[in-house]
Amino acid sequence: MRTNVIQATTPETITFKKKNIKRSAVEKLSVVIITYNEEKNIGRCIDSVAPVADEIIVLDSFSADATVQIARQKGAIVQQESFEGYVKQKNKAFRMAAHDHILSLDADEALSPRLIESILEAKKDFRFGAYAMNRCGIYRGKEIRRGLWYPDRKIRLFDKRIGHCGGLDPHDKIVFEMDIPVHRLQGDLMHYTYDSYEEYLLRNDQVSSTAARSLFEAGRKVFWPKLLLSPAWAFVNGYFLRGGFLDGHAGWVIALNTANQCYQKYNKLRMLRQKPIDKLEWRPATSQA
């Protein structure tokens, strides 16, 4: 297992040990999940985290399906609040957690058996402020272990006293107040993405709209070279350089749609800057891509 150092998002530079954070005799872990219409996923997600969780928090955005009932039947603590974006919603959910260490998951994710073992080992002392894990996407039942979808490393286990959710919707990330070592866990976070090509196209449209709006609100600009070259690089990098072609037809579809999402994002940003739209029509129909 490897340990890397992640730099702070502020000029402050202090080590994790100098923070004088007290350790409890028995380390506890809160698993936090945000949901909206996730009845096909939430049960699998909760079952996978049950061996490592001391509590499971589900913050739901008033699902119209059986998400809430399933989560409660599985023993989760369920709260409901209106969705205000991934970053805000996850920070709300983190504040609901009773324990300092948080494992943040999307409802369409699940822990592999090896990752469960790694987290249980980490729980013995939580020597690090943050833990990263590889995420393995599953497209139409096929595990994708090449291209831009793997290893797709994410920091999902962290100490909320020194970290929080940041980034730009819909691509949130965990950011820290100081420079800390990040330890990589063995095992994969399994990401159950799309069951059909049509679902993939719909999600691409939703994600690109949200990303364009976030970039627009952050004051970002886009120029023609980036609009054209970024999608081309996404395809070449994912399909050829990262070996996506070895995944057969699925690799082709993913590389093509990754490039298409990139183009849509920047093209929608271009249109927003030309004539701002009051609100892009989007509702969080599924978990984060």
Image (cartoon, rainbow, N blue to C red):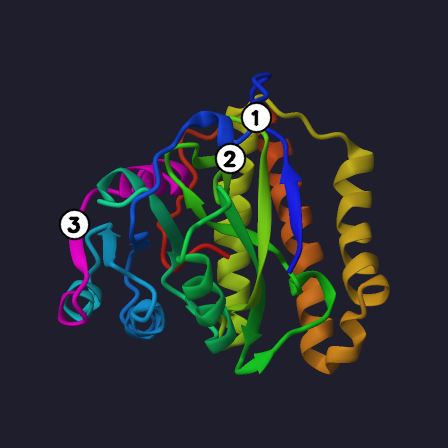
Query: Quick one: label 2, few (<14), some, or many (20+) residues within 10 Å?
Result: many
| Residue at x 28%, y 73% (from the top left corner) | 43
Q: Amino acid at mark 2?
A: Val
Q: Which mark is residue 9?
A: 1
Give whichever of 284, 223 is nearer the camera.
284
Side (left or right) of 179 relative to 210: right
Give whichever of 83, 52 is nearer the camera.
52
Nearer-N-terminus badge (1/2): 1
Give whichever of 116, 209 is nearer the camera.
116
State the residue position of label 2. 175
| Residue at x 81%, y 70% (from the top left corner) | 243
Can residue 192 be spotted in the picture?
no
Instruction: Give the total of numbered labels.
Output: 3
Q: Secondary structure at mark 2?
A: strand
| Residue at x 83%, y 59% (from the top left corner) | 236
* Quadrant position of residue 150: bottom right
Q: Which mark is residue 79?
A: 3
Looking at the image, is 119 positioned above or below residue 145? above
Can residue 284 be spotted in the picture?
yes
- Image location (x, y in percent) of residue 36: 29, 57
The answer to whether the residue labelled 1 contacts the one labelled 2, judged by CB atoms less than 8 Å apart, is: yes
Nearer-N-terminus badge (3/1): 1
Region of the chain picked out in magenta, as a range: 72-93
- In magenta segment, residue 89: yes
Query: Quick one: label 3, few (<14), some, or many (20+) residues within 10 Å?
Result: some
Real-space Cα separation, disc 2 to disc 3, in angstroms = 24 Å
| Residue at x 51%, y 42% (from the top left corner) | 173
Q: Residue furthest front?
A: 25
Looking at the image, is 243 positioned above or below residue 262? below
Q: Secondary structure at mark 3?
A: strand
Real-space Cα separation, disc 3 to disc 1, in angstroms = 30 Å
Q: Secondary structure at mark 1?
A: loop
